[in-house]
Image (spheres, helix red, strand yellow):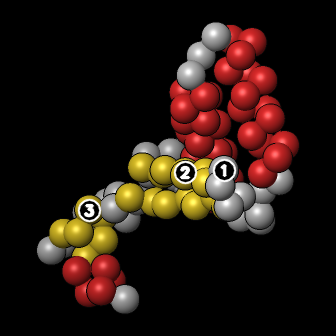
């Protein structure tokens, strides 16, 4: 993902947190969940486990697809074999 505008993101998180009387961490977590859901909708499949992490200190975002390493893949969306995992 492109670098985020840290000042705008921090200001938005603080503003929402104050308006809704929520901890900033809760607001940031909801934003991360929304990013993960949007990525899954646009790039993945419905049953994938996708996580997003925002770093407001350096303005970066990381989206990860979580898969289980198995001997024999039965579900490509959530599993990967050991050889593929080593790459």
Mark 3, Cα crowd under 10 Å, few <14 / some 14-19 / many 20+, is some
Residue 80 image position (x, y, % from top left): 30, 71
Examine the image and state in which quarter residue 77 appears.
bottom left
| Image vertical order of residue 30 relative to residue 40, above or below | above
Residue for badge 1: 56
CB atoms at circles 2 and 1 under 8 Å apart?
no
Task: Please tell me which of labels 3 and 2 falls first in the chain.
Answer: 2
Residue 79 image position (x, y, % from top left): 30, 64
Residue for badge 2: 52
Q: Secondary structure at mark 1?
A: loop
At 50% from the left and 45% from the top, the residue drawn is 46
Task: Please tell me which of labels 3 and 1 falls first in the chain.
Answer: 1
Residue for badge 3: 68
What is the CA distance from the residue labelled 3 to the residue labelled 1? Answer: 29 Å
At 67% from the left and 21% from the top, the residue drawn is 17
Mark 2, Cα crowd under 10 Å, few <14 / some 14-19 / many 20+, is some
What is the CA distance from the residue labelled 3 to the residue labelled 2? Answer: 18 Å
| Image vertical order of residue 87 relative to residue 7, above or below | below
At 56% from the left and 22% from the top, the residue drawn is 23
At 60% from the left and 28% from the top, the residue drawn is 24
């Amino acid at each position: 993902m492109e670098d985020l505008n840290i000042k705008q993101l921090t200001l938005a998180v603080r503003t929402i947190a104050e308006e809704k009387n929520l901890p900033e961490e809760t607001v940031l977590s909801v934003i991360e969940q929304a990013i993960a859901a949007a990525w899954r909708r646009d790039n993945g499949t419905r049953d994938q486990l996708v996580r997003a992490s925002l770093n407001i200190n350096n303005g970066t975002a990381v989206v990860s697809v979580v898969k289980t390493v198995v001997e024999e893949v039965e579900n490509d969306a959530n599993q990967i074999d050991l050889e593929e995992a080593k790459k």
